[in-house]
Amino acid sequence: MRKGFLEIDGSIGEGGGQVLRTALTLSVLTGRPVEIRNIRAGRPNPGLQPQHLTAVHAAAAICQAELEGAALGSQTLRFIPRSQPRSGEYVFDVTEVAGRGSAGAVGLVFQTLFLPLALVPGESLVVLRGGTHVPWAPSVDYLQEVFLPTVARMGLDAEIDLVAWGFYPIGGGEARVRIRGRPGPLTPLTLTERGSARKVRGRTVVSNLPAHIPQRMADRARNLLVRAGLKADLQPLVTRGAGPGAGIFLVVEYEHIRAGFSAYGRKGVPAEQVAEEACRELLAHHESGAPVDPHLADQLLLPMALAAGTSRFVTSAITGHLLTNLTVIQAFLPVQVRVDGEVGQPGVVVLTGG
């Protein structure tokens, strides 16, 4: 192995793609070469899949990195940055990497690129093509409505626009991200109180499917939320895309923060059941009294690690994903971390970066 490589075991914790993405982001930001072994060892289809390989190529493009092992199915990757990250205009397409239609999540590619481009001077325009709304990844709606407004408090300035919807398994969607970069460090963040709930808003969407489906999702979700004492403003939408798809996207607005939840249609699953899945997650979070939803908790760790001072938040559920992410961050950065709480239960995270 070349001198200076930081070795990361991709099988740690959940053994999923988050290990890879966090390692790539921090390698770009620190300039530290990294070797990642056992990539996605904990998944049924281990190794680099199209969305992961797209993230690898994207990270390499912004810092002129040298790559070894960057191929579909590879379980070992060496990533050697050759320059500081550079702002500019970029296009990354999961379909091109896959060699076919793919709903590889553009939200996960965004996660890899966002901080490196946000922490260098200059404006960047990034076009991302693939799956915009797919399971197990932040949707464009979530990034727009929850993640970016929250990290704006830390000094990060970006917006993401949905150009075309891309559902699993075909993808074919497109998002455009504009990032106005600035030198760090970031401002610490405290999210320990959420205030009262103002309302739930969102949309139910289908692509290439009958119009009664989003209406049924909206009606069922509205009934459940109103029964729980929450005001609900839900908009049914019918759109066209590369393939069929359906989903519901809910944002609950509290006085001091937003939380987001979604669910996707599958063959043979009634529209009402899809709505119930999203509402079940939302109501579990709401009843916990915590401000930060489990998805946002995981995504806030990297910005907090790059802030000058101590950040803290209360989340409705500590997840294995969160703990895995922290392990990778601590391999790169001398942060101090305290996690109070058990996996699956509400908890407090305190992180001192700088």
Image: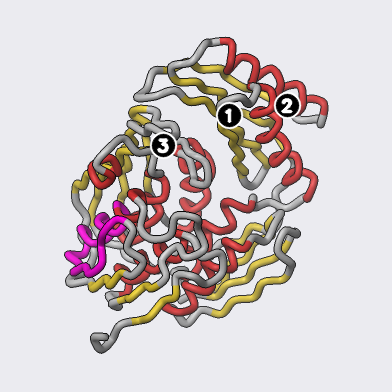
Q: Which mark is residue 248?
A: 1
Q: Nearer the viewer, residue 140 or 35?
A: 35
Q: Which residues, given as a range, are shown in magenta?
A: 54-72
Image quadrant for the C terminus? bottom left
Residue count near mark 2 (Cα–Cα under 10 Å), binned few <14, some 14–19, many ≥20: some
Is residue 62 found inside the magenta-colored segment of the image?
yes
Identified at 40% across, 44% down, the residue is 105
Is residue 233 found inside the magenta-colored segment of the image?
no
C-alpha separation, residue under disc 1 versus residue under disc 2: 16 Å
Q: Is residue 190 above or below residue 151?
A: below
Q: Secondary structure at mark 1?
A: strand
Q: Secondary structure at mark 2?
A: loop
Residue count near mark 3 (Cα–Cα under 10 Å), binned few <14, some 14–19, many ≥20: many
Q: Nearer the viewer, residue 106 or 292?
A: 106
Q: Give the image quarter of residue 73.
A: bottom left
Q: Give the image quarter of residue 121.
A: bottom left
Q: Earlier in the sequence, mark 3 or mark 1?
A: 3
C-alpha separation, residue under disc 3 versus residue under disc 1: 13 Å
x, y percentage for residue 250? 61, 33
Disc 1 vs disc 2: Cβ atoms closer than 8 Å? no
Q: Name the amino acid type tagged 1.
A: Ile
Q: Is residue 325 left or right of residue 312?
A: left
x, y percentage for residue 98? 28, 45
Q: Which mark is residue 231?
A: 2
Q: Name the amino acid type tagged 2.
A: Lys
